[in-house]
């Protein structure tokens, strides 16, 4: 895995490396039974060089605990390995990656999947799900189901933890969090089989 990580740091497959601080490669046990795939690193991940260490990572940790999935037994990564952002005042705001940027990173995701060989893959958010299933995948219609893909035999898609954080009010955040936990419980059940 170290060789893959080192090689990814030299990647120039798209222009995102020009404005990102660094590559944010996946992290977790090489023998993890479950791999979580997000969209791309966020601001904190870009600064620290580790996936899911910002607010969305804290939300994922809480959801995993509530669903009964030990966080130290999962591998976390992103479909895109560099942070794509736009300036807004002094802040760097997430900007959705283009299809070409997702495609440029696809070999890294495939290599991680081969190296870890998880029993189940969980796509966090529409971008991650579409990177695994194709652009026709409809997250809100197909979330929470164990489905096959060309990348892995068992994949579950759910909302991204940041969707919980972005909900407009407390009630919306509670509903989104319940949805996330329900989907993660499907993953936990599939892992027990």
Image (cartoon, helix red, strand yellow):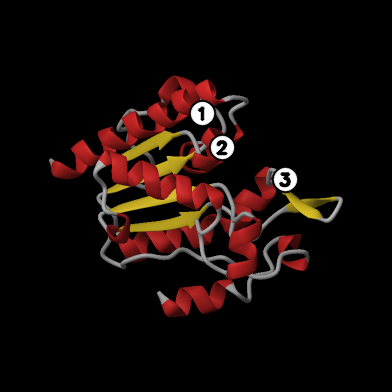
Q: Which residue is mark 2?
A: 165
Q: Residue at x 40, y 74 (%)?
A: 1
| Mark 1 vs 2, N-terminal side | 2
Could you tell me how far apart the alpha carbons at marks 1 and 2 are, in whole angstroms? 7 Å
In front here: 50 or 54? 54
Could you tell me how far apart the alpha carbons at marks 3 and 1 are, in whole angstroms? 22 Å
| Mark 3 vs 1, N-terminal side | 3
In contact (CB < 8 Å): disc 3 and disc 2: no
Residue 55 vs 49, above or below: the answer is above
In contact (CB < 8 Å): disc 1 and disc 2: yes
Q: Secondary structure at mark 2?
A: helix
- Image quarter where the C terminus lies is top left
Can residue 153 be seen in this snapshot?
no
Q: Residue at x 72, y 64 (%)?
A: 20
Q: Residue at x 86, y 51 (%)?
A: 89
Please tell me the numbered disc located at residue 173: 1
Left or right of 168, for residue 58: left
Q: Dot 2 surroundings within 10 Å: few (below 14), some, or many (20 or more)?
A: some
Q: Position of residue 92 (x, y in %)?
A: 76, 54
In front here: 45 or 39? 45
Please tell me the numbered disc located at residue 95: 3
Q: Residue at x 59, y 56 (%)?
A: 41
Q: Dot 1 surroundings within 10 Å: few (below 14), some, or many (20 or more)?
A: some
Can residue 88 be seen in this snapshot?
yes
């Amino acid at each position: 895995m170290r060789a893959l990580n080192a090689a990814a740091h030299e990647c120039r497959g798209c222009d995102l490396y020009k404005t990102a601080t660094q590559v944010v490669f996946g992290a977790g046990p090489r023998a993890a039974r479950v791999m979580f795939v997000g969209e791309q690193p966020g601001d904190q991940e870009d600064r620290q060089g580790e996936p899911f260490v910002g607010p969305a990572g804290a939300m994922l940790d809480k959801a995993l605990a509530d669903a009964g999935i030990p966080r130290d037994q999962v591998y976390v990564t992103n479909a895109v390995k560099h942070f794509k952002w736009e300036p807004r005042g002094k802040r760097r705001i997430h900007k959705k990656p283009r299809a070409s940027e997702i495609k440029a990173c696809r070999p890294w995701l495939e290599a991680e999947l081969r190296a870890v060989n998880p029993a189940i893959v969980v796509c966090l958010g529409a971008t991650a799900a579409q990177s695994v299933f194709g652009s026709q995948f409809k997250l809100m219609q197909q979330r929470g189901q164990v489905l096959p893909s060309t990348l892995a035999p068992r994949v579950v898609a759910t909302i991204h933890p940041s969707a919980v954080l972005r909900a407009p009010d407390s009630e919306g955040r509670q509903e989104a969090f319940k949805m996330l936990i329900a989907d993660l419980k499907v993953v936990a059940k599939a892992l027990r089989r």
